[in-house]
Amino acid sequence: MKKPNYCPDWFDISLYDGLSDFSRDELSMALWFRQMNYERLGEIINGSYTTKQEKEDEKAYALDWLKCCANKWVVQPIKYKNSGNKINYNPLKIEPDILSDITWGDIARIYTESYVTIPEVRQFVQETRQTLELCIKNLEIGANIHTDWLSPGDILPEDMPQEDIKAINNLFRKPVSKTLNYSTMIHIDLGLSDEILEMAFKQKLKELRQQEERERTRRFSDAEIRKMIDYRIFAFMDLYVYSLIVERKFTDVEMAAMIYPPSNNAPLDFDAVDRIARTVRPKAMELLEKTNARLLL
């Protein structure tokens, strides 16, 4: 069927069927890309850019980003599809950052962020500066300095209020990931067998996933994701963002004509306009504005 004259040239509804082959990882990324573009577009519309030319340049960039979401990134190879069924599949070759060593850059970031944002860390560092300088001097004369003794009760001044010492001590017992916006870090005892470590890691991963799901509300089920794709909600999001860029609002009737075109001139077995108004539009706006993309993982 011929496209309506108001339908953008780049829009091809048949491409969105490819989302059914996407893994959860890829669907999450697909939503995140759209959310970033939508948020940035909101800043453009709300006047964050001063000159008219700057605003037009940013709109052009948003349109290019949108076309990638609707075309290039829909048809690209599926990295994780059926990965669990591949023989000798090594996910670290696909995405090395799935598991990675902590670098000194990470350590510097943890120190900087904690010093700036957590009063107890700042207080501890300031109060122990002289003691740590003494440790350096002792190291220079051959003393064997370890950090096992590094506890607030041992290193902080005797005249420091006990409630301050207790607060710092309590903080030191907390995992970094519960205190800072940083990836979860886990200490692994390599003195144990591989079998025990695998069992322990699976259990820990289960606990971390459950904790994360509680913090970020509820993970989308397979059925919900299937409905999201079948109802072509991603297509609606792209057309809605396009309408903001070109400042041309699409009605529910127009959206229905672009998203649910008749196949071989056969009539639809549902009310497309009603579906757009009651289900697709509200869900698309919820995904763009209020949903953590990681709920798709």
Image (spheres, rainbow, N blue to C red):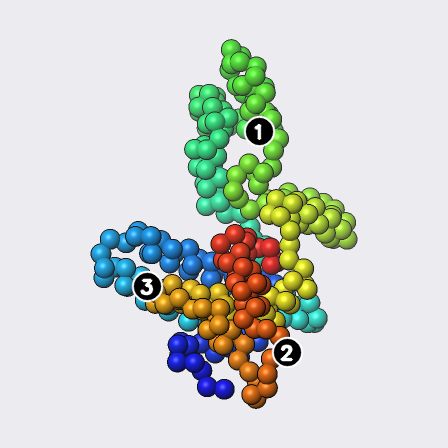
For the C terminus, the quadrant is bottom right
Name the residue nearer the viewer: 297 or 51.
51
Q: Residue at x 51, y 11 (%)?
A: 159
In this orientation, does residue 232 appear?
no
Image coords of residue 224 (percent x, y) = 65, 62
Secondary element at tag 3: helix
Residue at mark 3: 59
Q: Which residue is mark 2?
A: 269
How packed is label 2: few (under 14 Cα within 10 Å), some, or many (20 or more)? few
Q: Can you tell which quarter of the image residue 185 is in?
A: top right
Q: Viewer-nearest of labels 2 and 3?
A: 2
In front: 84, or 50? 50
CA distance separating discs 3 and 1: 46 Å
Q: How many marks?
A: 3
Is 105 located above or below residue 141 in the figure?
Answer: below
Up/down of 22 relative to 2, above or below? above
Q: Which residue position holds label 1?
A: 171
Whole-number angstrom distance, CA of label 1 to CA of label 2: 60 Å
Residue 187 place in picture, x, y as percent: 64, 43
Badge nearest the viewer, 3 or 1: 3
**N-terminal of the two: label 3 or label 1?**
3
- Residue 165: percent from the left, percent from the top? 56, 19
Q: Amino acid at mark 1?
A: Leu
Q: Is residue 207 above or below residue 248?
A: above
Q: Is residue 265 above or below residue 103?
A: below
The mark nearer the N terminus, 2 or 3, is 3
User: What SS does tag 2 mark?
Assistant: loop
Q: Nearer the viewer, mark 1 or mark 2?
A: 2
* Residue 86 visible in the picture: yes
Q: Position of residue 139 (x, y in %)?
A: 49, 28
Q: Is disc 3 surrounded by few (<14), some (14 to 19) or many (20+) residues within 10 Å?
A: many
